[in-house]
Image (cartoon, rainbow, N blue to C red):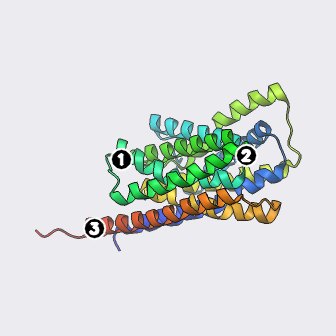
Amino acid sequence: MSKLELDHRKGLLITGLGGLILTADIPLLRLGQGETWSTLLLRSVTTFVAALVIWAVWSLATGKMRTIVPGRIGFIVAALYGLTSITFMIAVYNTKTANLVFILAFNTVFSALLSWIFLKERPRTVTFVAMFFMLAGVGIIVYEGLSSGHLFGDLVALLSTFILSTAITVSRSSGKDMGFAAIIGTALPMVVAAFMVSQNGYAVAVPGWIIFNGAVVTTVAFLCLATGPKFISGPEVAMFYLLETVLTPIWIWLVFSERPSDPTLAGGLIIITALICHSLWQMYHARKRARMTALPHPV
């Protein structure tokens, strides 16, 4: 097996682990029973501190000080992930969980478009077909949000998805390891949340859930998901956010008995079906290109 294939498998494993862990994020935020900015502050502080501890232990264990933010591009990626955290938290408290995670699945489409624009990787016809169906699914969810009073939250969720896709695309184009840069990006929401809390007061009923979320779940998930673009394509990384789309509504349904509305389920089913078909197609062709690249050329 070639190094390229090994790196690809490594990227799939790391990113898949991050996507699976991330499915616990929203349920833990809900269990914390806090208001938006207080929850964001506590989550960001614990994530930031945990990242520094992991970096210090990692550097001591390996005897080599690992770069936290790789240059100017690293700060851009960190800022993008920071903005994603802010918009994501606002969406959590302004729309239903199912609406949020189904809209976040649109990440793959945004990643494909941004890769086309900035990396000159033109999407194929199948991508445009998937985009059409996913747009239809998101349209159903947003329309339902308009009638149920969740339009603002749905639109913020869509914005969060776009910013996240931008972060993935920039990371992929740099070819650098952005694992710690993504976590250090929590400094931005931490500052914004601290200002808002100073104005409105602090309120988190069960802080233990938020601390665990920030120190373990968010830190490990971001570290894995932000490392993925070094080894695999942007659309492939985006695919693993589908785990949150599929599993989080189930956890919320089991823990909080919050059943998604019929329009949300219909839109989500359209999005998931289109996304699974498109992502499997992307992975197949990525592996095919990797095998072709690894073949020795005749002299």
Which mark, by number, is residue 294? 3
Residue hosting label 1: 116
CA–CA distance in space, label 2 to label 1: 35 Å
Label 1 vs label 3, nearer the camera: 1
Residue 295 at what x, y percent from top left? 24, 70
Work out whether mark 1 precedes mark 3 in sequence or the reverse, and give the earlier one.
Answer: 1
Q: Amino acid at mark 3?
A: Ala
Residue 93 shows in the view: yes
Relative to 289, is 211 above or below?
A: above
Mark 1 Cα within 10 Å, few/some/many (few <14, many 20+)?
some
Indicate the quadrant containing the C terminus: top left, top right, bottom left or bottom right: bottom left
Number of residues whose C-alpha sits closer than 10 Å to that of mark 2, classed few (under 14), some (14–19) or many (20 or more): few
- Lower position in the chain sequence, tag 2 or tag 1: 1
Is any part of residue 63 visible from this angle? no
Q: Which circle's residue, 3 or 2, is located before the other in the chain?
A: 2
Question: Amino acid type of disc 1?
Answer: Trp
Q: Which label is found at residue 198?
A: none
Quarter of image, res 150: top right
Task: Name the secondary structure under disc 2.
Answer: helix
Distance of label 3 from label 2 (alpha carbons)? 53 Å
Of badges 2 and 1, the one in the foreground is 2
Q: Nearer the viewer, mark 3 or mark 2?
A: 2
Give, as a three-letter code, the residue at label 2.
Ser
Name the secondary structure under disc 1: helix
Q: Which residue is mark 2?
A: 148
| Horizontal and vertical percent position of residue 241 | 57, 57
Q: Residue furthest bottom?
A: 1
In space, the residues marked 1 and 3 are separated at their CA atoms by 24 Å
Name the one closer to the observer, 111 or 216.
Answer: 111
Residue 262 as seen in the image, left or right of residue 203: left
